[in-house]
Image (cartoon, rainbow, N blue to C red):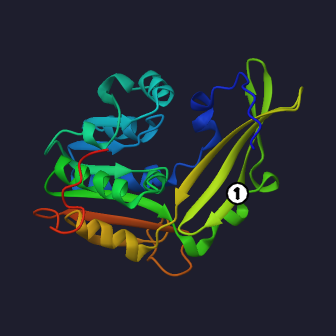
Amino acid sequence: MLLTVRMAFDFAAAYDELNPDDRDHLCYAALADERGATRVLDLGCGTGRLTRALAARGRTAVGIDPDPAMLRVARSGPGGEHVDWRRGFSDRADTCSADFAVMSGHVAQVFTDDAAWLRALRDLHRALVADGVLAFESRHPAARAWERWTRAATLRTVDTPDGPVEFWHETAWVSLPLVAYDTVTRDPRTGEDDVHRAVLAFRDAAALELSLGTAGFTVSHRYGDWTRAPLTDDSPEIILVARRGAGPEVGDGADLGSA
């Protein structure tokens, strides 16, 4: 049983500090530029750093996320007034409203249920115009990232108004394609922990491409890292760029609605 003690720590406000690497954002911004995108959709936008960057280039931008705390940070960031922020899931996207859609921050992995993942892809297909582009990434299961989710490897200290807080990840269990991990924040003054458990799906490239095809997409590019190196068995990431086709395949689950 997990011990959960609430402490004064604003995770949403600290998220960008805890995740300063922006190589993924630079890659997606370049893809949007190459596409000549004018209307973008960011599903699972989080704190909106990428969404605001895309909007800053004169694009119409929509950011969707279910977490009100993340959207609070997104709205307050520089340029936040230029983005249409929406609380909810993929069904909040308007039909034929974007020519470029993105899921960054390994959002694709939070869909642990295959039916929910397919619903999200179909909502994105509906939201894109003809020949629109979807780009996203998922951690390559062969890289076994979960083996590096330990306190020793991930420990960081964040300053808060009430003093420093320790923050780290620990893998809880592995039953591929699913991996559970704990995010722990600790008040070093009291030793109190706040523990949140989450589960991620580590789908391989074949499974991801099959789901994209079922949802009506055709994969155009496959990359293995943020330099856009080719996808190999040793790649840390599976980064897929797919184009919207005429429509989803008809078959099992074709009548699934939005989450």
What residue do we see at 80% from left, 28% from top? 164
Q: From the image, tell me which residue sits under label 1.
A: 171
Q: Quadrant of residue 38?
A: top left
Q: Position of residue 2 (x, y in %)?
A: 74, 42
Instruction: State the SS at label 1.
Output: strand
Q: Position of residue 181 (x, y in %)?
A: 66, 53
What residue do we see at 52% from left, 48% from top? 22
Question: Which image quarter is the C terminus in?
Answer: top left
Confirm whether residue 223 shows in the render.
yes
Amino acid on which the number 1 mark rests in the picture: Thr
Q: Position of residue 203 (x, y in %)?
A: 47, 68
Confirm whether residue 34 shows in the render.
no
What residue do we see at 39% from left, 51% from top? 103
12 to 38, vertically: above or below: above
Question: Which image quarter is the N terminus in?
Answer: top right
Q: Position of residue 72 (x, y in %)?
A: 47, 23
Quick check: 80 left or right of 190? Answer: left
**Other residues around mark 1 within 10 Å, as few (<14) / some (14–19) / many (≥20):** many
Q: Relative to the observer, which residue lies in front, 254 or 73? A: 254
Q: Relative to the observer, which residue lies in front, 147 or 159? A: 147
Quick check: 226 left or right of 94? Answer: right
100 to 12, vertically: above or below: below
Quick check: 4 left or right of 29? Answer: right
Q: Residue most toward the front?
A: 1
In the rendered picture of this protein, how many numbered marks are placed on residues? 1
